[in-house]
Amino acid sequence: MDSVNPKRILVVGAGHVGLYAALRLSKKLSSREAEVIVVDPQPHMTYQPFLPEASAGNISPRHAVVPLRRELRKCKVLAGTVTRIDHDRKTATVQPISGPTREIRYDHVVVAPGSVSRTLPIPGLHEHGIGFKTIGEAIFLRNHVLDRLDVAAATTDPEVRRRALTFVFVGGGYAGIEALAEMEDMARDALRYYPELKQDELRWVLVEATQRVLPEVDRDMGAYTVQQLLKRNMDIRLDTRLESCVDGIVRLSDGDSFPTDTIVWTAGVKPSPMLDATNFPRDERRRVTCLPTLQIVDGDRVLEGAWSAGDCAAVPDLTKEPGNYCSPSAQHAVRQAMRMADNIANVVRGREPVNYKHKHAGSVASLGLHKGVAQVYGVKMTGWPAWFMHRTYHMSRIPSLNRKVRVVVDWTLAFFLKREVVALGQLHDPREEFAEASAPVR
């Protein structure tokens, strides 16, 4: 260990992997042993399991994110984007949010840019779809759904009303199911303030290409979820694909078509395209190939000082048969991050890294307020107990006591105060009114 020249550890990305890895490294290694630099274009980490709750107004959107500079006080946080990594030279090129690019040399690099929405070349999707992976998308969806209620209540045109009150969600995984259920719950609650609208006028459509939802749990739990959504008069289309949405006209593979103003795409993720700017080995799904120690490997050659984990990494799952890899879940990402940080600390101190091995504990999902589904260590729960477990688990996992307290306060206030159902659409184009007022007189 060289205490005169500390090792430089570059963390690319500040999602679940990046934040937890940097935080653990800063606690395990002294400033004499290592310098930790975190690069991310956003000043915060988004705790994605709370996006549906933030979108539905159950918690403040600010409480679903963790400020990097507050949490990583022993690290150097650089707001920018890594545009290239040349591991042969152990150099990364960073484009700050403003100003010229800069090169950063490193001894160890943690490649954790995460994932982006996996889309398909469906006509009209680029123009009319919205994802559900960022806090910005969650806030937009909330404001958009409430705005559509205002549009429907104000219009006298039945076609405009029908289009405004049709909401389509594509993808039946956890993100899609939770977003759909929480948005329907919020809209149902909001209708008390819209005497012009009736509950049966709202149409909620789930489009799923396979024959089941929630593939992470057993089929009976997925079937239970579908039954609960059907009881809420949702339109569930299994074994159905979105074929086109040009001009907002949804055309499905079952032959049905209808207009809508809302198309939410939650049909899977893919590794961040940032990895294309690196010379790291990738598998057929474009993930960085890794050993169980979280070290990046090229065939049989371990790339010294290169590490990866999370959605963008192909990490062998040692709890299953050879050839299986860890699923892209927050549960694995957080645990991999901590194991990886410990391994980096071991290598810095001249020790051997240890394999990552974790049997997936199960999954929990919210289906709206006081409704949920859970399968944890083989134990299955539904309804209120599952919803309570969902909240308890994620409250325990979000980083920092500050955020835990704020989230619990939000939930506590919600027991006594009615849900906020006001749309703040001006957030998405704040200069429109000023631009109109300051336009030159002609």
Image (tube, rainbow, N blue to C red):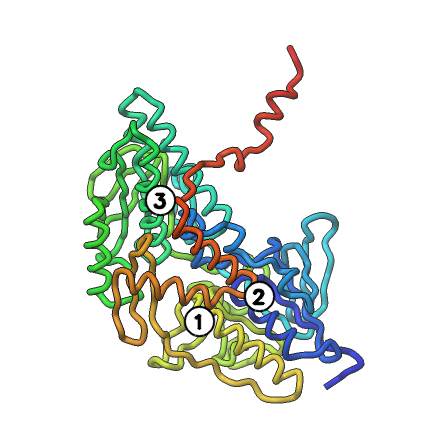
Left or right, 189 with reference to 26: left
Amino acid marked by disc 1: His
Q: Position of residue 92 (x, y in %)?
A: 67, 63
Mark 3 lies on residue: 186
Q: Position of residue 343 (x, y in %)?
A: 57, 81
Left or right, 62 with reference to 363: right
**N-term mark: 2 or 3:** 2
Question: CB of mark 1 within 8 Å of CB of mark 3?
Answer: no
Q: CA distance from mark 1 to mark 3?
A: 30 Å
Q: CA distance from mark 2 to mark 3?
A: 31 Å
Please tell me which residue lies in front, 177 or 131. 177
Q: Position of residue 352 (x, y in %)?
A: 58, 88
Amino acid marked by disc 2: Leu
| Mark drawn on residue 332 | 1
Mark 2 lies on residue: 19
- Residue 273 in sight in this render: no
Q: CA distance from mark 2 to mark 1?
A: 14 Å
Q: Residues within 10 Å of mark 1 (few under 14, many from 20)?
A: many
**Element on which disc 1 rests:** helix
Of tags 1 and 3, which is closer to the observer? 3
**N-term mark: 1 or 3:** 3
Q: Quadrant of residue 364?
A: bottom left
Amino acid marked by disc 3: Met
**Element on which disc 3 rests:** helix
**Element on which disc 2 rests:** helix
